Amino acid sequence: TKKSRFEIQTLTGWLLNQEQAGVINAELTIVISSISMACKQIASLVQRASISNLTGVQGAVNVQGEDQKKLDVVSNELLKLLGIIASEEEDVPVAVEESYSGNYIVVFDPLDGSSNIDAAVSSGSIFGIYSPNDECLADIGDDPALDQSEQRCVVNVCQPGDNLLAAGYCMYSSSVIFVLTIGKGVFAFTLDPMHGEFVLTQENIQIPKAGKIYAFNEGNCQLWDDNLKKYIDDLKDPGPSGKPYSARYIGSLVGDFHRTLLYGGIYGYPGDKRSKNGKLRLLYECAPLSFIVEQAGGKGSDGRQRVLDITPIEIHERLPLYIGSVEEVEKLEKYLA
Ligand code: AHM
Ligand code: MG
């Protein structure tokens, strides 16, 4: 349906339409809407970070040995209200009793690329939602002294990305953009700072089939295998068309992915001699973004196989990631084969 330029659709309105059409149920609508609320709060914290002294490190180190930025911690707390969660900032997946998630399993990276924030460069939150799961592997924090919101249950969240019901991200950049798929295409909503609402700005996003932009951290190229080096060298070779590929690398997964989704090309975080599986996490980075890219007609691969086919064994498991335009990802897979 065509909308006049005065007719705006908010994320809330769009979600209600999807619910009425039977695409999602009421509970999932609430989960997604709660995530978007948390993202709005994170957006305002990110924007005010240097004013409210939220830049810099918290002093703690997360389970993966990374410095936690103050904002990583706060963002995690905001998203944690959601229920069963697995997060980059938590060591085990936990079920939070008093929550809004109706037991849906929500996996997320609360604030990816947070090292960029001190310089006001893009960052983002990434999430994925799986069906409810009653299985409780262990209770933690069932000390009666803790209040109910602290009661937690360890759950099994390790599923292949193919089981995702929904996935999305929120990018905190010159605009705040919430990108969402519920398995029927990819939609983008821009936060309207005048009204504090996410407004539908792009419907059914399709990634270009090919695109001459590559986003890899080439500083690591001495650690890469020769096939990958050859692939990158060939991208720089203008050939008969006369134009080499352009390099773009923010070092912020959500920002680099969002550009790739809109302009086409390829984003890669390879494994290398030092870290065999690269840096990115399968469960809450690679899988949600691969679901989104496939819904937009693109491809997400670990260089050999489809990311969405892989079941994580461990929640913080890392995976090499090559994601973007179908033709670009397939070309890379040929070099690595
Ligand atoms: P973080 O989890 O410490 O925020 O780092 C994640 C970021 C990704 O956003 C980005 O794609 C990658 O790390 C960049 O890593 P590198 O600096 O090694 O290129
Ligand atoms: Mg991350």
Image (cartoon, rainbow, N blue to C red):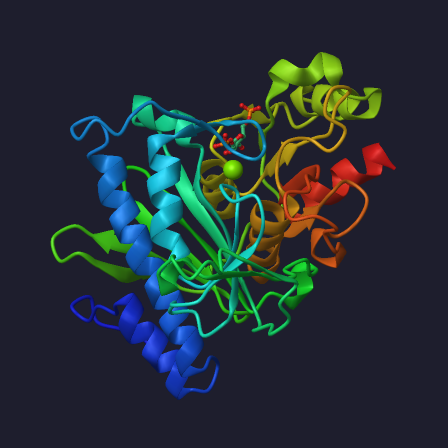
Q: Is residue 1 visible?
A: no
Q: Name the residue nearer the viewer: 112 or 324.
A: 112
Res. 29 image quadrant = bottom left
Q: Residue at x 46, y 44 (%)?
A: 258
Where is residue 239? Give x, y as percent. 71, 23
Q: Name the residue nearer the viewer: 183 or 138.
A: 138
What quarter of the picture does the C terminus occupy? top right
Q: Residue at x 29, y 45 (%)?
A: 42
Q: Is residue 313 above or below residue 48?
A: below
User: Taking 26 as reference, is 240 left or right?
Assistant: right
Q: Is residue 147 above or below residue 322?
A: below
Q: Name the residue nearer the viewer: 266 or 318.
A: 318
Q: Is residue 4 above or below residue 298?
A: below
Res. 37 image quadrant = bottom left
What quarter of the picture does the N terminus occupy? bottom left
User: Taking 50 as reference, is 206 left or right?
Assistant: right
Q: How many marks on residues? A: 0
Q: Residue furthest left?
A: 194
Q: Is residue 308 visible?
A: yes
Q: Is residue 337 above or below residue 129?
A: above
Where is residue 226? Give x, y as percent. 83, 20
Q: Residue at x 36, y 48 (%)?
A: 77
Q: Name the residue nearer the viewer: 6 or 124.
A: 124
Where is residue 135? Give x, y as percent. 64, 71
User: Taking 322 as reference, is 73 left or right?
Assistant: left
Where is residue 309? Give x, y as percent. 75, 58
